Amino acid sequence: MRLQKSSLTGFIILLLAIFSVVFHLIFSNNFEYHRDELLYFSLGTHPAAGYATTPPLIGWLGFVLIRVLGYSLFTVKLVPSLLSGGMVLLGAALAKELEELFSDIIEVGRISNPYAREFGTTVYLCRNPVCSFNAFYYEILVERGVLKDEG
């Protein structure tokens, strides 16, 4: 059975994400504690609704990690390692969305005036825009309260 292009691509991206996590975990012992990581451990021992220097989720995450895995270098490096794999997956998802977004863009020419600052710049045109820029900008201005919605 032959794999389809999208499933093969998804499998490769998943392998890259796993590789990123494993790579970070393998080499995490080469570094010592960073002062911020020690701060997170400290905040985890006294979770609160807010801190002066960090958001409250960091203290609560530290609290859970300390209770589950204890105080260790591995515990501190686990979350960034998992997030690195998540970033690979997120980057791949964004690239897929951008590919679909820019699939209808065609090159229509180049700026040919040699005295123009943009001389030689390629000019693109979107064949099937989702909405016009004016409609998009109007929605933003209505959301911010600059304009009143008349429709």
Image (cartoon, rainbow, N blue to C red):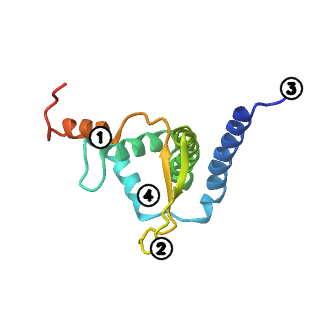
What amino acid is at disc 4? Glu
Q: Nearer the viewer, residue 74 or 133?
A: 133
Q: Point out the frontmost of discs 4 and 1.
A: 1
Q: Can see residue 71?
A: no
Q: Point out the frontmost of discs 3 and 4.
A: 3
Residue 1 is marked as 3
Q: What is the C-alpha distance between the residues marked 2 and 4?
A: 55 Å
User: Counting residues from the N terminus, which is met first, the one under dot 2 or under dot 1?
Assistant: 2
What amino acid is at disc 1? Asn
What amino acid is at disc 3? Met
Q: What is the C-alpha distance between the residues marked 1 and 3?
A: 49 Å
Q: What is the C-alpha distance between the residues marked 2 and 1?
A: 31 Å
- Determine the residue positioned at 44% across, 68% down: 118
Q: Is residue 9 above or below residue 30?
A: above
Residue that mark 4 sits on: 37
Taking the image as shown, residue 63 lies to the left or right of residue 110, namely left
- Which quadrant is home to the N terminus? top right
- Determine the residue positioned at 70% across, 39% down: 9
Q: Assess whether mark 3 and mark 1 are in contact (beta carbons under 8 angstroms).
A: no
Q: What is the C-alpha distance between the residues marked 4 and 1?
A: 47 Å
Q: What is the C-alpha distance between the residues marked 3 and 2?
A: 56 Å
Residue that mark 1 sits on: 134
- Which quadrant is home to the C terminus? top left
Q: Nearer the viewer, residue 35 or 2?
A: 2
User: Counting residues from the N terminus, which is met first, the one under dot 4 or under dot 1?
Assistant: 4
- Determine the residue positioned at 64% across, 60% down: 27
User: Counting residues from the N terminus, which is met first, the one under dot 3 or under dot 2?
Assistant: 3
